[in-house]
Image: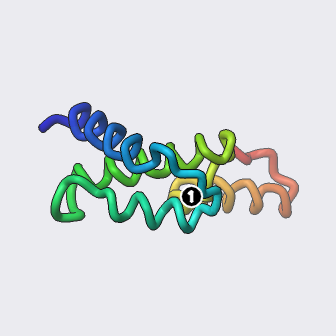
């Protein structure tokens, strides 16, 4: 199954799971979605796609509020360079 097919199946399963759910608590919604996982083992591409779609569904229910994500190593390196430049007065903060 291709990534697009995993994504479509994940979206359909999430829509079925959340159909008629009035809960607004993120923990309760995550519990419902955890139980609705349709792909068997929670590993590899299907699970990664599922997690992406769960995150997107929760963000949509929250009115577009972006959930916290762990910063990437690249982002942390940029921040470190920027902070170093800000404290030393250097203009090299790219």
Number of marks present in the image shown: 1
In percent of the image, x 55 and y 62: which residue is there? 70
| Residue that numbered label 1 is attached to | 69
Give percent across and percent down for residue 38. 23, 53
Q: Assign the N terminus to one quadrant of the image.
A: top left
The one nearer the camera, 33 or 23, is: 23
Tell me the quarter of the picture where residue 10 sits.
top left
Give percent across and percent down for residue 58. 55, 50
- Which residue sits furthest left? 1
In percent of the image, x 66 and y 40: which residue is there? 64
In percent of the image, x 73 and y 47: which residue is there? 93
Relative horizontal placement of residue 59, taking residue 87 as reference (left or right): left
Identify whether 64 is placed above or below 39: above
Q: Secondary structure at mark 1?
A: loop
In percent of the image, x 48 and y 62: which residue is there? 30
The one nearer the camera, 46 or 70, is: 46
The one nearer the camera, 65 or 23, is: 23
Give percent across and percent down for residue 61. 61, 45
Identify whether 70 is placed above or below 49: below
Q: Assign the C terminus to one quadrant of the image.
A: top right
The one nearer the camera, 55 or 36, is: 36
Q: Residues within 10 Å of mark 1 (few under 14, many from 20)?
A: few
The image's colour scheme reads rainbow
Tell me the quarter of the picture where residue 36 sits.
bottom left
Give percent across and percent down for residue 34. 37, 63
Identify whether 91 is placed above or below 43: above
């Amino acid at each position: 199954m291709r990534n697009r097919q995993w994504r479509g199946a994940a979206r359909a399963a999430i829509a079925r799971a959340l159909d008629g759910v009035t809960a607004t608590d993120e923990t309760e919604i995550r519990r419902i979605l955890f139980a609705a996982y349709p792909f068997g083992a929670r590993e590899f591409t299907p699970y990664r796609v599922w997690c992406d779609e769960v995150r997107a569904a929760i963000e949509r229910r929250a009115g577009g509020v972006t959930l916290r994500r762990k910063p990437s190593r690249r982002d942390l390196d940029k921040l470190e360079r920027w902070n170093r430049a800000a404290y030393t007065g250097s203009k090299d903060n790219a």
